[in-house]
Amino acid sequence: MTQAKNDYFCGMFVRINGSQYEGRTMLPVVEDFVRRFDLPDFVIVADSGLMNKINLSLLDSAGYKYIIGARIKNETEEIKQWILSLEKTDGCFHELGKLPRSRLIVSYSSNRAKKDEYNREKGVRRLKTAFQSGTLTKENINKRGYNKFLDKSDNVQVSINRQKISDDEKWDGLKGYLTNTDLVADEVCAPCSILLPNALKPRLYMFCRIQGL
């Protein structure tokens, strides 16, 4: 999906094998879109599910500008400590330069923090219900959703790790974006929230949300 300066939208739907990893589908779809519409200048906006080193390298090599959701919890220990030390104030943005040409921008939202807390508490309640009913097994121990809070003791007993929950709370409200554009921080974060006020400089945004069928 794109936005031109007159706020008209156009879209393109691509059918992709549902078993195909979406991280490998982004660039072919982008290149097809560019050819079809002869785009002069644009910014690719995609969620973190499409972010991997190969994709970013290919986008950089092709000269494409991008804003991509960052997996801030998967950053290096040094960067994670920097993120957690940031002031948590609405409307406040923090930047960190990353090689070769990208910037990591981190923002905080109290509304997002409330949503993160609500979703986590809902997920933990489900885990507690499953735990009390005895339906949790070692097969449930994985990183999918809130199963990440589960632990296994003595290779038999499955339990809910309170420390993991406490550690997760520290990230409430924080959101990261990786970009190689020259946009200022608030302009980077606005398209990612699908908030495109008229105050933004006229630009063309391509939103990539690819879903297999």
Image (cartoon, rainbow, N blue to C red):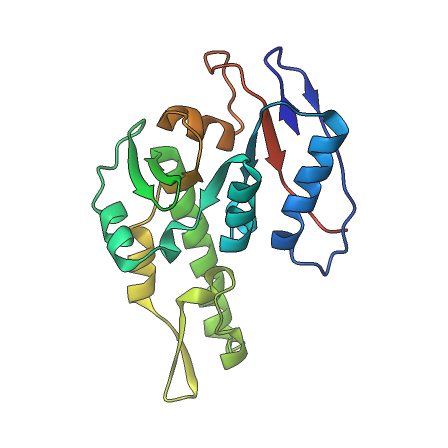
Residue 57 rendering spot, x and y as whole percentages? 51, 49
Q: Is residue 26 left or right of residue 87?
A: right
Which quarter of the figure is the N terminus placed in? top right
Tell which of 59 and 201 is nearer to you: 59
Q: Is residue 111 left or right of residue 69?
A: left
Residue 155 rendering spot, x and y as whole percentages? 41, 88
State the image quarter where residue 92 is shown: top left
State the image quarter where residue 28 is shown: top right
The vertical placement of 39 against 178, above or below, is above
The vertical placement of 48 against 125, above or below, is above
Residue 82 rendering spot, x and y as whole percentages? 23, 48
Q: Residue at x 55, y 35 (%)?
A: 64
Q: Residue at x 33, y 36 (%)?
A: 108
Tell which of 105 and 145 is nearer to you: 105
Q: Is residue 183 visible?
A: yes
Q: How many marks?
A: 0
